[in-house]
Image (cartoon, rainbow, N blue to C red):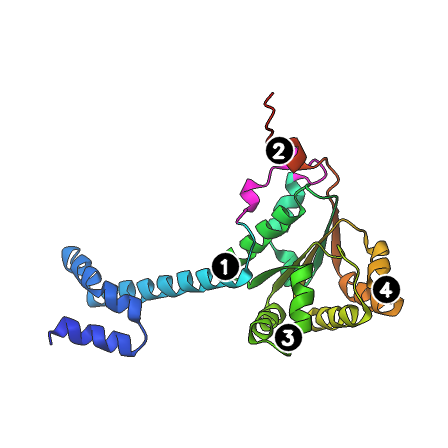
Amino acid sequence: MSQLQQLQETLKSLRLVETAKHLPILIREAEQNDHSFTQFLIDVTAYEQACREEKQFNNRMKWATFPFHKTLDEYNLKEQKSLSSKHLNRLKDLNWIEQLYNLILLGPPGVGKTHLAIGLGIEAINQGYKAVFTSMGDLVHNLKTEEFTRKSKARMKRIREADLVIIDDLMFMAMDQQEANMFFHLINDLYNQSSIILTSNKAPKEWGELLGDQAITTAILDRILHRVEIIHLNEDSYRMKHRSTIFGQ
């Protein structure tokens, strides 16, 4: 076994697998540029750090389970006059996550609520936060099956450990008392620990109609609205304005 192979095996045993694979190239670059031993070690450790950061980013993107990939740069402010460029930039800097603020994105279908929520989630991951996206329907299903299936248990664990939880289509369906109670306990778990983005076409004052239990509704609102920014997206549906048609012009 050559010295290079010995060194590669040592790096693998230290769990520096990607650096072990890339080592011949790092050595060749050091020789070509006449690097010092110190500079060579800097290059080796920097490569390993970059690989780990990329792996962490990819894992966080996978765990987030975004239904599509839409960034804030793709968000068309010209189509949404109720949100200014200044306000979007303030959202993008993510100070509100550090302050444990919640966001409620309100508006009819098709105005870009989900796109904005996902864009903020991707930006959070880019800045090193853990973000998770779930529809309200999937969330209720996972809450109800958490004790019985390993998949739901793992999913709820990631939601509870996230820095940012995005719940899409909140209150699109009525809940029974058991579901409302489980939802309250989740919100209580996230309170003072995570930020939440909620998208909904119903204002908070209407949530009681779908939750059924006024006491649970009050408790949920108390936690969500303690620190919250409510953004009304009231323009015409972007999807309707830019829909395809079989009839042409």
Compared across the picture, whether 196 is left or right of 30 comes to: right
Q: Residues within 10 Å of mark 4 (few under 14, many from 20)?
A: some
Give the mark nearest the N terminus, 4 or 1: 1
Q: Residues within 10 Å of mark 2 (few under 14, many from 20)?
A: few
Q: State how far apart marks 4 and 1 are (Cα).
A: 35 Å
Give the mark nearest the N terminus, 1 or 2: 1
Badge 3 vs badge 4, beta-carbon distance below 8 Å: no
Badge 1 vs badge 2, beta-carbon distance below 8 Å: no
* Residue 9, image x, y percentages: 22, 76
Q: In front: 241, or 116?
A: 241
Q: Is residue 117 above or below residue 130?
A: above
For the residue marked with disc 4, what is the amino acid?
Answer: Gly
Compared across the picture, whether 64 is left or right of 35 comes to: right
Residue that numbered label 2 is attached to: 243
Using the rendered image of the protein, determine whether residue 196 is visible from the camera's viewpoint.
no
For the residue marked with disc 1, what is the amino acid?
Answer: Met
Q: For numbered disc 1, what is the local secondary structure?
A: helix
Q: In this view, does 83 lie above or below 144?
A: above
The magenta stretch is: 69-84
Q: State how far apart marks 1 and 2 are (Cα).
A: 29 Å
| Label 1 vs label 3, nearer the camera | 3
Q: Residue at x 17, y 76 (%)?
A: 6
Badge 4 vs badge 1, beta-carbon distance below 8 Å: no
Q: Work out which quarter of the rendered image holds the C terminus and state it.
A: top right
**Magenta stretch, main secondary structure class:** loop
Give the mark nearest the N terminus, 3 or 4: 3
* Residue 193, image x, y percentages: 66, 70
Q: State how far apart marks 3 and 4 are (Cα).
A: 23 Å
Compared across the picture, whether 42 is left or right of 162 comes to: left
> In the drawing, what numbered circle is on residue 212?
4
Residue reaching furthest to the front: 246
